[in-house]
Image (cartoon, helix red, strand yellow):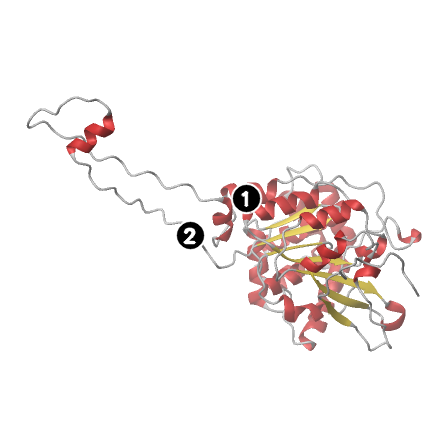
Amino acid sequence: MLLSACQGGSDAVDHTAVAAEAPTPQAALAGSGAGAEVAEGSAVGAEDPAEPPAPPTAAELVARAGPLEGAAREVFWGTTEDDAPEVLNATREDLEGRHYLYCDELNVHVFYPELRDIGGAYAGVGSDQAYTFIGWMRPQLAWLTDYDPWIKALHQSYFAFFEVSEDIPTFRSWWSEEREDDAVALLRERYADEERVDLTVLVYRQAAYKVARRLRRLRNILPEADVPSFVTDEEMYQYVRNMVMEGRVRPMLANLLDEDGLRGIGEASRELGVPIRAYYLSNAEDYWNYPDEFRANFENLLFDESSVILRANATKSRNGDYRYNMQDAIAFQAWLREPGTRSVDDVWDRTWVRDETDIPFDRTRDLPPEDGAPEEVTD
């Protein structure tokens, strides 16, 4: 994918070489180790050249505004992805194998006040949600993680369209039925050298009308909530677009239950000096109890005191949507260390949905009790 919003806080390294004081003839001799005497009237050697400045570190490079370059780009884009799974999990057996090509959560804007301008790095599952969160957070880096190859392929379309779209109307037009042939031609040209270009085209054809509908929904819902987004606010759109263009957004296969993808993200964020300030899980935790791989993956991620976990839980039968939760990430890590923490049910005390107008949202800050999480769930 393309995105990269190079945001502020540039810790530029001073590359101005400071000349050292000229050594005396005696000092020059002592430094040479020659032990010879200098004849009267002989010329003294030239000044020792100043040491060249050390090259900027990956962390210094990532903090600079502009395209991600050099060691920082290698670290960010160079970590190992996971293999595609044999089966795409789901909350029910009849839903296994489905590709979730757009977000159906109608109230993600409940996260906006606490995500606004928090910086750092973003990571999370899904498709269009990522660009919404990036616009709000203004991160330096973003890892778009999913275990479904179709989601990564869909991000390829987002990237290509961001590249050629200088404003929101142009970007939205690429998802329309009228521009389908133009879009396919663009994708085949943009990714001609990639083995999986056929998958990118297939996924675009399957997803375009769904993405168009989702973007229309965002344009209706978010202004009513007085919340900006990358499809309603031109300045925010440009930030997201720049992130992609500058190589600061990476779509990748990363399975919450596998061993490489998330471990690499944790190592890269440490080397780059950028904590993950938000990890979006959607409702993935409803698919399974917490296995060891999941615990290890989140233990390895770099969080700080401002970092949060974002999640949702489907309650469509009652409110046509979800209930939402934000948890302090460091507290979540503490819960995962407890053997008695078996699933999200132990971590999140879910609020009851009263009726179709009720959209619960809560913030979890609690650490596990000193004697650990309960060993048994009681009714």
Mark 1 surroundings: few (<14), some (14-19) or many (≥20) residues within 10 A: some
Residue at x 69% of width, y 41% of height = 81
User: What element does badge 1 sit on?
Assistant: helix
Residue 316 in picture, x, y percent from top left: 86, 68
Q: Amino acid at mark 2?
A: Ala
Q: Nearer the viewer, mark 2 or mark 1?
A: 2
Q: Nearer the viewer, residue 96 or 197?
A: 96
Left or right: residue 68 compared with residue 208: left
Q: Amino acid at mark 1?
A: Arg
Residue 242 in picture, x, y percent from top left: 55, 56
Residue at x 28% of width, y 45% of height = 18
Image disc number at residue 216: none
User: Residue most toward the left?
Assistant: 40
Residue at x 63% of width, y 70% of height = 228
Left or right: residue 50 compared with residue 220: left
Q: Which residue is mark 1?
A: 73
Q: Which residue is mark 2?
A: 12
* Residue 202 visible, this angle: no
Q: Earlier in the sequence, mark 2 or mark 1?
A: 2
Residue 232 in picture, x, y percent from top left: 63, 69
Residue 130 in picture, x, y percent from top left: 67, 58
Q: Nearer the viewer, residue 186 or 240?
A: 240
Residue at x 24% of width, y 29% of height = 31
User: What element does badge 2 sit on?
Assistant: loop
